[in-house]
Image (spheres, helix red, strand yellow):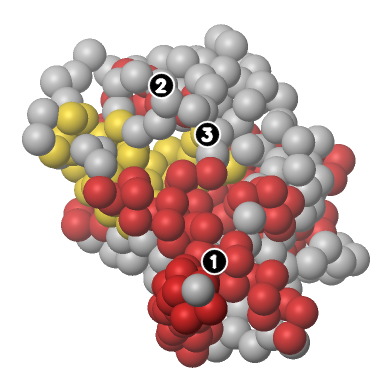
Amino acid sequence: MKSVWLVFTLVPVVSAFYLSKQDEFHFKSWMAQHNKVFNMEEYHQRLQIFTENKRRIDKHNAGNHSFTMALNQFSDMTFTEFRKSYLWSEPQNCSATKGNYQGSNGPHPDFIDWRKKGSYVTPVKNQGPCGSCWTFSTTGCLESVTAIATGKLVPLSEQQLVDCAQDFDNHGCYGGLPSHAFEYIMFNKGLMTEKDYPYTAVEGICVYKPLLAAAFVKDVVNVTAYDEMGMVDAVATRNPVSFAFEVTSDFMHYHQGVYTSTKCHDTTDKVNHAVLAVGYGQENGTPYWIVKNSWGSSWGIDGYFLIERGRNMCGLAACSSFPVV
């Protein structure tokens, strides 16, 4: 009986050990790819989180979805940790229900991408562990609007907004709104370049120098809340447009395809991340937005993502805006 006992106990132990080694192999490969180093306690904690994320990704990709997920630089984080570091700590009040945008009567092209129209969009940037996405949405939009008006594409300072725009209901690394940031730039009479006021990913003392202001705002245009066709008109006829939406856990590992969600909300009070619509199109019958993110070029589609258009997906039409220069 003793030999039988050994056979029955060894089978599950060997199986569990094999799975653990596979998980560790994937984790160590991921660590090497992303230059991650952990102490022993952190290693086992992050290994477990990584493995859970990988299994969730694999399960999603085995199903029938309009987008795929993949491991990325965030794969050792829970969504709670990710949300605390990279998204707004609390949703911002962006309920400008009646906007001042006056749209055209169209018609609108089926496809537009401002990256292909000329030198109008700066490279994807990386906000780091700071909920300053609103500043990147702001600078990205102002960079493009200024380039369309002047022919000169100049990277602008997110750090100035993080450090200096609090009087306009913005909160540094804890959230803010592009529309409020445009108002700050308008009343402040300028925004410096990224070179002259570089990004640090932490809130510091405001050191704005008016003589070095490189971009200016004459007016702020808000698209009426939930008017997604107004956004289409603005992107088609004017310029890229800043908007906010609600990020939920599956978006953290977005890889490619048209993102849709049944978990997110579509109201102004739930949005927690600001980005930049640089165009739109259609794939397999599904209309989408082309969106510039601020999580680095290794995330998503070289730092961009596609999200379903026409259904106010995740509240993306709740509060969109752009500046006039």
Which label was assigned to residue 312? 2
SS state under label 2: loop
For the point 43% across and 38% down, the residue is: 241
What residue type is disc 1 on?
Answer: Phe
* Foreground residue among 102 and 243: 243
**Which residue is found at the position 58% from the left and 42% from the top?**
273
Front position in the image: 13 or 189: 13
Amino acid type assigned to the residue bearing label 3 in the image: Phe
* Separation of marks 3 and 1 at Cα, in angstroms: 26 Å
Q: Are marks 2 and 1 in contact (CB under 8 Å)?
A: no
The residue under the point 49% across, 28% down is: 263
Secondary structure beneath dot 1 equals: helix
Kindly identify which numbered label has been placed on residue 245.
Answer: 3
Point 42% across, 65% down: residue: 71
Q: Is residue 124 visible?
A: no
Horizontal side of 12 relative to 217 (left or right) equals left
Mark toward the start of the polypeptide (2 vs 1): 1
